[in-house]
């Protein structure tokens, strides 16, 4: 069994479907948590609902477009726990715009969250990550295959893949591994508009004939963050029911 007892995980976007499933799984596996999101209030109720009371959980309001927010949360993590062992960058934003209608400002806003936000998270997090730790960045099938009317998001996620491989090389001397998970369509609030628009079309194109559940991404993140993946770095784990393979 994977055992995270004594580990400390720092998670961004922790009000989200995938991040909450990850936080719950890490809590069940014994990890203490630093949960962060741009909206702080719901985090406290969620933290109070976590079943493993042996593991501690602290929360902080962090907008990943703010270096100051991330630095402050990482300083808090150091003060509370002496450092962190696992960093999960899960904050994300998936708005819709064709390239034809894209303003410069909107393009930059989407990259600020989905690409710059991951860089800022990793830059601040690496300073408090203990040697031998692990980073898991949540990318997307969109970063590999593209998605019409979400080019900004797809470009940002493709950037996350290249960024993560570079960071993996920079942090390897400290024994810190950096990997990505690239989800396909997962049933969370983020994908609700797309699921409604596409109906069963996406499911029909997915060999396993269903959408994914947040816990199926959480378990991939837990694997990559664990010693079971101790010789894996600079890699991307696709979790999409075969949809990427099938196109
Ligand atoms: N759901 C899917 O189908 C799917 C597919 C591929 C990739 N992903 C990725 O998985 C991750 C989690 O997505 P989800 O499906 O759980 O979405 P979600 O909408 O449920 O959660 C996203 C979370 O990110 C937070 N967030 C957004 N902007 C932020 C900011 N500037 N600062 C801090 N927090 C911010 C939101 O408050 C929210 O809690 C994202 O990176 C997303 O791009 C999701």
Image: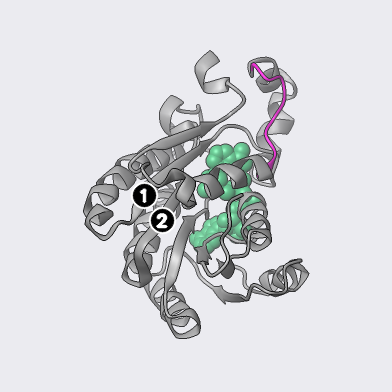
Query: Please, is residue 45 above or below residue 218 in the view?
Result: below
Residue at disc 1, CB closer than 8 Å to ligand 1: no
Circle 2 packing at 10 Å, graded few (<14), some (14-19), many (20+), is many
The answer to whether mark 1 and mark 2 are in CB contact below 8 A is yes
Q: Is residue 217 left or right of residue 154?
A: right
Q: Earlier in the sequence, mark 1 or mark 2?
A: 2
Few, some or many residues within 10 Å of mark 1 (<14, 14–19, 20+): many
Mark number displayed over residue 178:
1
Kind of element beneath mark 1:
strand
Residue 41 within the magenta-colored segment of the rendering = no
Find disc 2 in the rendering and name its residue: 134
Comparing 104 with 191, the one in front is 191
Residue at 36% across, 68% down: 130
Which picture quadrant has residue 123?
A: bottom left
Q: Position of residue 1 (x, y in %)?
A: 61, 49
Range of residues picked out in magenta: 207-214
Residue sitting nearer the eye, 202 or 32: 32
* Vertical relation: 50 (above or below) 72: above
Residue 229 horizontal/vertical position (percent): 44, 44
């Amino acid at each position: 069994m994977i055992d995270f007892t004594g580990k400390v995980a720092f998670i961004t976007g922790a009000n989200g479907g995938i991040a909450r499933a990850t936080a719950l799984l890490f809590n069940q596996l014994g990890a203490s948590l630093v949960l962060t999101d741009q909206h702080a209030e719901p985090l406290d109720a969620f933290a109070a609902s976590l079943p493993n009371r042996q593991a501690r959980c602290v929360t902080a309001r962090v907008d990943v477009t703010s270096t100051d927010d991330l630095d402050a949360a990482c300083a808090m993590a150091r003060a509370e726990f002496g450092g962190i062992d696992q960093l999960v960058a899960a904050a994300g934003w998936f708005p819709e715009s064709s390239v034809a209608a894209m303003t410069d400002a909107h393009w930059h806003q989407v990259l600020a969250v989905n690409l710059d936000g991951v860089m800022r998270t990793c830059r601040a997090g690496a300073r408090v990550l203990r040697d031998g730790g692990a980073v898991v960045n949540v990318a997307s099938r969109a970063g590999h295959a593209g998605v019409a009317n979400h080019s900004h998001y797809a470009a940002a996620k493709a950037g996350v893949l290249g960024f993560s491989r570079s960071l993996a090389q920079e942090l390897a001397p400290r024994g810190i591994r950096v990997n990505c998970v690239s989800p396909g369509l997962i049933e969370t609030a983020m994908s609700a508009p797309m699921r409604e628009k596409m109906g069963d079309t996406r499911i029909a194109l997915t060999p396993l004939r269903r959408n994914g559940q947040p816990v199926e991404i959480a378990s991939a993140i837990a694997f990559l963050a664990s010693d079971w993946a101790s010789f894996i770095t600079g890699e991307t784990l696709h979790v999409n029911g075969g949809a990427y393979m099938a196109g």
